[in-house]
């Protein structure tokens, strides 16, 4: 049987760190996974396990780091 299709819209930081292993496991099981990623991010990157779609944001990495 064919795998399912998933659209993942995670938050950057700990939310993504918790979700990434699940996304990778779904991909290994034959599911097609698309992860929506902001252009400016700490940990979120495109990987072979899933398709990444980026979107523009109005902040820089320096502003993101300064907000914490």
Image (tube, rainbow, N blue to C red):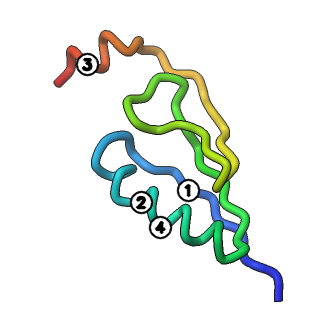
On screen, 36 above or below 56? Answer: below
* Residue behind mark 2: 19
Label 3: few (<14), some or many (≥20) within 10 Å? Answer: few
Task: For the C terminus, give its image quadrant.
Answer: top left
Residue 47 appears left or right of 51? left
Please name the residue shown 53% across and 63% down the image: 23
Task: Tell me whether the residue at label 1 lies in contact with that at label 2, contact meaning CB atoms closer than 8 angstroms.
Answer: yes
Label 4: few (<14), some or many (≥20) within 10 Å? Answer: few
Q: Earlier in the sequence, mark 1 or mark 2?
A: 1
Task: Tell me whether the residue at label 4 lies in contact with that at label 2, contact meaning CB atoms closer than 8 angstroms.
Answer: yes
Q: Earlier in the sequence, mark 4 or mark 1?
A: 1
| Residue at mark 1 to residue at mark 3: CA–CA distance | 24 Å
Q: Which residue sits furthest right?
A: 1
| Residue at mark 4 to residue at mark 1: CA–CA distance | 11 Å
| Residue at mark 3 to residue at mark 2: CA–CA distance | 21 Å
| Residue at mark 1 to residue at mark 2: CA–CA distance | 9 Å
Q: Nearer the viewer, residue 36 or 21?
A: 21
Residue 60 falls in which quadrant of the image? top left
| Residue at mark 3 to residue at mark 4: CA–CA distance | 26 Å
* Residue behind mark 4: 22
* Residue behind mark 1: 8
Task: Tell me whether the residue at label 3 lies in contact with that at label 4, contact meaning CB atoms closer than 8 angstroms.
Answer: no
Q: Which dot marks residue 64?
A: none
User: Element under label 1?
Assistant: strand
Q: Which dot marks residue 65?
A: 3
Please name the residue shown 61% across and 45% down the image: 47
């Amino acid at each position: 049987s064919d795998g399912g299709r998933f659209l993942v819209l995670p938050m950057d930081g700990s939310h993504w760190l918790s979700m990434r292993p699940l996304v990778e496991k779904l991909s290994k099981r034959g599911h097609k996974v698309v992860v929506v990623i902001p252009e400016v991010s700490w940990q979120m990157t495109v990987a072979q396990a899933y398709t990444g779609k980026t979107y523009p944001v109005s902040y820089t990495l320096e502003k993101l780091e300064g907000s914490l």
